[in-house]
Image (cartoon, helix red, strand yellow):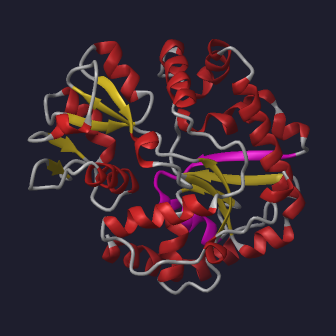
Amino acid sequence: MKKFLALTLSVILLTVGTFAVACNPAADNVIRLSEVTHSIFYAPQYVALQMGYFEEEGLDVQLADGAGADNVMTALLTGEADIGLMGCEASIYVYLQGKKDYPKVFAQLTKRDGSFLVGRKGGEFDYSMLEGKTVLMGRKGGMPAMILQYVLNNNGLYDGVNVTMDYSIQFALLTQAFAGGTGDYVPLFEPNASLLEQQQTGYIVSSIGKDSGEIPYTCYTATPEYLEKNGEKVEKFLRAVWKGYDYILNTPLKTVAELLEPLFPDTDVEIIESSLKNYLEGDVWTETPVVDREAFTRIQDIMENAGELEKRVDYETIIDTTVASAI
C-alpha cells in the first residue's frame, strides 16, 4: 500500500507542472467537483444538484466520477478539479509523502463507513458468529478493509487465528464474488447490499459504520490556494449540500428516491429508497460540515491498526475549518 501511494504521488508530482499550465481556470461561478465514486452514499449533494440548490447559490457545479481517491487527488493537484470528495486519509498520505502544498480537508459529508456486513443468513447477529468463517475484505490497505479489520479486531477476531480475512478480491468485485458463493460474510455499500437482500442471496446483519464509530469517512478537499481565493464560493457550495441533507430528513424517502433515480438509471426506485432508509438508520451523514477532532483521531487509530500509517498527523495539519464553521 505504501509503495503504491509513493508511486501515485511521484506520478502526481511529475504531472503537476505539465497540466497546471494546460488547464484553464474555471469560470467564477463554476465548481469542478470530482467524487471518488458515484454512490447513493453521497445523496445530499445529488439532492442539491437535482433540486437546483447550487443554482440558487449562483453556482454551476460540474460533477465527475474520479474512480478512486488517487485519481481525485491527481485532479486536484493538477488543477483539473476544484474540489475533491474522498477520504481524508488521501490528504494524510500525500502530506506524509512530503508534498508541501497538499490539499486540505475543509468539510466532511459522511461520518461513518457506509458499508454493511452481509451474511448468508439473516436474523440475530453477534460478531462471535464469525469465528471460523471467511470474511471477504476487499483490497488490503483500502479504507473499507481497514475499517472492517478494526471492527473484527475489536471483537477479538484475528486473521489466521480465529477468522479468515480474504483480501484477494477487489472491492468492486465483492458483490459478484459473494453472490457466486465465495466467503461467508462481505462488506457492501448500497445499493448492492439491498440488491442481494432482494435476490435473497445475502442479508444485512450489521452496520459496519455504527460498529466502528464516527470518522471523517468522505470529505470535501481542496488546495490551500483555492480555499484562500474562493472562500465565499466554497461557503455557498456547502450551504447547498447541507440544504440537500435537510431535504432528505424532511421528505418521504420514496420522493427522494424518485428525485435521484435519473442519476442512477440502472437502479430501481425501490432499491434507492431502501438504500436511503438504511443510510438514515445508519446515521452516516453529518449534521455539520466541521470535521470532529475525536473522529479524526479514530481514523488514524484505524490506519495504525492496519499497519498503514507511518506516523500520526495533527488535526490542524490536515483540517481547515474556516469555511465549515460559518455554515
Along the line of sight, the residue nearer the viewer: 105 or 171 = 105
Residue 5 at x, y percent in the picture: 39, 73
Residue at left offset 40%, top offset 42%: 211
Is residue 173 rendered to the left or right of residue 230?
Answer: left
- Residue 77 among magenta residues: yes
Q: Quadrant of residue 208?
A: top left
| Quarter in which the N terminus is drawn | bottom left
Q: Quadrant of residue 261?
A: top right
Residue at left offset 75%, top offset 21%: 250
Work out whether 251 lies above or below 279: above
Is residue 127 rendered to the left or right of residue 288?
Answer: left
Along the line of sight, the residue nearer the viewer: 115 or 229 = 115
Is residue 8 rendered to the left or right of residue 22?
Answer: left
The answer, for residue 208, to whether it is visible in the render is yes
Which segment is the magenta one? 59-78
Residue at left offset 46%, top offset 40%: 210
- Residue 156 among magenta residues: no
The answer, for residue 177, to whether it is visible in the render is no
Along the line of sight, the residue nearer the viewer: 318 or 199 = 318
Residue 42 at x, y percent in the picture: 59, 39
Residue at left offset 75%, top offset 27%: 247
Q: Quadrant of residue 205?
A: top left
Is residue 185 rendered to the left or right of residue 104?
Answer: left
Work out whether 249 lies above or below 1: above
Work out whether 72 lies above or below 259: below
Residue 236 at x, y percent in the picture: 86, 49
Residue 301 at x, y percent in the picture: 42, 65
